Image (cartoon, rainbow, N blue to C red):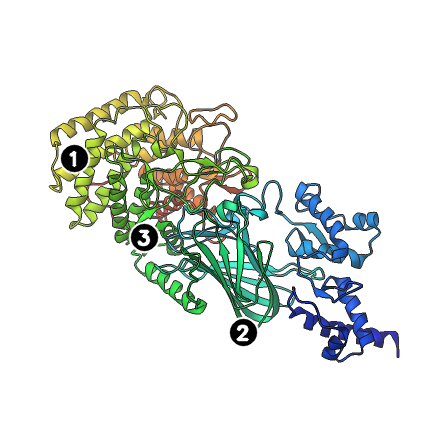
Amino acid sequence: MTAATVQKGLNEACAALRGFVGQYPHDKALPAVEELARRIGQSAKVTRAVLRELDADGDITVPRRGAGRRLRLNEAHPKDKAFVGEIRDGILSGRYRTGTPLPVGLLAHRHGLGTRRMARVCRPLLADGLLVSRAEPGGPRLHVAPWVPGVYGSAGLIEDYCVLGDQRGAALVRSDGSIDWLCLRRFDSAAVFARLLGTAEHGFWKLAPATRPDDVSAPVSVRRYVGDTMVLGTEWTTESGVVTVTDFMVPGDQVPQVVRIVTGVQGQVTMRSLLRARPDYGRTVPRLQHVDERRLAIDLGEDGDGSLWLDATEPVQADGGDIQADFTIVEGERASFVLSWREDADSPPPQPAPDAQLKHTLDHWTAWVARCTYTGPDRPTVVRSLLTLASLIYSPTGAIVAAPTASLPEELGGIRNWDYRYAWLRDGAFIASVLARCGYLSEALAWKDWMVRACAGTPGRRQIMYGIGGEPDLPEKVLSWLPGYEGSSPVRVGNGAAGQLQIDVYGEVADTLCEIALASPDEAPGIAALVVELVTELETLWDQPDMGIWEIRGPRRRFTHSAIMAWVSVDRAVRLIELGYATGPLERWKVLRETIHREVCENGYDAERNTFTQYYGGSALDASLLHAMLCGFLPAEDKRLIGTVEAVQNELGAAGGLLLRYRTEGQHGGVDGLSGDEGHFLICTGWLAETLERIGRHEEAAAVRDRLLSLRSDVGLLAEEYDPSTGRHLGNFPQGFSHLALLRAVLETGPVSAGREHVAALPAGLSS
């Protein structure tokens, strides 16, 4: 018998035993050699040789005494633990830089390890995502992964995430299949996966093809939302086959759930699910309790918020707070994992029906989109941003959050990190307005009703934001155990700005309420009465210094934008009274309207430069002045309006229409009282497009709009800010401000050569 024949027989025996072992439980000892020999039809001698081969490859461990055991993909061979630990520590400490080749030859030489042994050493690091295999002209080569869990966290680029939502809570899924942020049952619940703001130790749930050391190329993913829905589909192509992973949260009033369905498309693919729940923003390791091999309970603790339950169609193992499943999916097969929240820790949820839940979720979002009245160009863009805004609605109350995340930085490594999972009156008013214009008047009315209830809880002290249930107290605290996104600390939850005086809010809310009233005559008298209440309260406040639209943390000032929005509030009340929808001191408020207008033009306008300024008596500019110029304070042909647009564009702008909110002063705290800088604020770019359109510069407006559109991620999402120097998104994500800005830019500008019939007209008498 030739050596080649012997080797061929050994290879066949290895393949047979590897197939058997691949289906064997990790925590169960392998059968005796004689039983394994019988299983693969080989002699005991050949079987022992095959066991040694699988041991050398890292599939199993075969001790000198006792039974062998199957190793998990990310589990180091007992003989390799020191070597694996050395490389892991080198990656986490930054000694081996992200994205660079791992010095495999140097490490092998240092420790006297052969090629095969080094492959076994690197195997668990590949499975954990610390290493990746890249094809090069000389063959595959191991590199340190672009993002690794370490001191500065393991989150991906902000724009690499997709949002899942059920209109109660939200999850962020990275392009590698990892859910790095999850707040179940409410947007402001403590995250159970917080790797977004920390490291892998702070919780995540990754479901993706398993990576093996002998793979020539890494799995490749292509993702997209399924039609006009919030269901995410990711197609993975590997060397052995193709699978899709379908991720979604189930809307409605049933149990809050995250569902992940794996479908075999072609060939076969080995998959791995690793769920590491860490309640209280990654602070604690939960107690896990097996109900059976496919159902497991996750106790969120005495101070936690109920319990989580994982139901799977594949066997799962619990180990040290981690829940893992390794399985192979073949063409035509499906596997599913459902994570459910229950308030009662001892009450399991009903057995899930993933396919029925998928149909329900697809039907829910499809029906929602069917109500959209926009019929013009860029409809897919409009629909995706409308869906994103819809995902920010807390359906039990009608509140609208600014964003579903907390403390994503406005400057990488900086301190400008805030919690946006609350309901600002301003943000809600902006979003309600654009929703109403696109056919979603019921959502706008639901927001109005929430606002009335929330403000009733603080009589005589209308706040600028509340919790999604109307909670007035949103204490701001620092989560010291989280290092922050790419080292951006402190990580804050809660928001101390809730108690600020921001006079502009009165104008923004009154403006939207006026729009809604005129669009729904049956509701108009009740809504008009709310506007009268706003102005009655404003009469004693309008001339006070405040913190402004950007809720500065420095000294109060007389911000010009705030003063103009006070004018807007009075103006809308006057109009509604004149239309007969409300009663109030009409003549007194006409005088007040004129008084505010005159004061702004005298104190907030720089005649020498022909521009309004950030605050009375100052010279600095502020992009919020563009918003002020859209509210009807001055006619479009007024030289002061045109001069302000030009000045802001020139002094705060970058190429392509990107704008700073205002000039920061680095480590010297500027007008906002904060050190550090920030990116270009995307809502300001939208305002620029609108004001350019308003003053007749249509081609320029369209170019700015198109620049904003170009910044969307591959799935159509926008963060709060953008850094043109690095091409990265910054701030909380996805951001309601940015998406409403995109929508308004599309609605207000449209194609240069097209008519405007597709745009829902504003109610008569309004110009904002």
Residue assigned mark 1: 574
Of the pair 540 and 20, the residue shown nearer to us:
20
Which residue type carries mark 3? Pro
Of the pair 570 and 750, the residue shown nearer to us:
570
The percent coordinates of residue 131 (x first, y second) are: 67, 52
Which residue type carries mark 2? Gly
Q: Secondary structure at mark 2?
A: loop
Residue assigned mark 3: 396
Q: Can residue 8 be seen in the rendering of this structure?
A: no
- Residues under labels 3 and 2: Cα distance? 38 Å
Q: Are marks 2 and 1 in contact (CB under 8 Å)?
A: no
Q: Where is the N terminus found, in terms of image quarters?
A: bottom right
Q: Give the left or right position of residue 268, taking residue 64 as reference.
A: left
Of labels 2 and 1, earlier in sequence is 2
Please tell me how crowded label 2 is: few (under 14), some (14-19), or many (20+) other residues with Cα within 10 Å.
Answer: few
Q: Give the left or right position of residue 759, taking residue 727 as reference.
A: left
For the residues carrying marks 1 and 3, which lies nearer the camera in this image?
3
The residue drawn where x is 35% and y is 50% is: 393
Of the pair 299 and 122, the residue shown nearer to us:
299
Q: Give the left or right position of residue 731, taking residue 317 as reference.
A: left
Q: Where is the C terminus found, in terms of image quarters?
A: top left
Of the pair 663 and 582, the residue shown nearer to us:
582
The residue drawn where x is 38% and y is 49% is: 392
For the residues carrying marks 3 and 2, which lies nearer the camera in this image?
3
Using the image, tell me which numbered label, if any, was put on residue 503.
Answer: none
Q: Secondary structure at mark 1?
A: helix
Which residue type carries mark 1? Val
The percent coordinates of residue 351 (x first, y second) are: 44, 67
Using the image, tell me which numbered label, if any, was put on residue 332.
Answer: 2
Please tell me how crowded label 1 is: few (under 14), some (14-19), or many (20+) other residues with Cα within 10 Å.
Answer: many
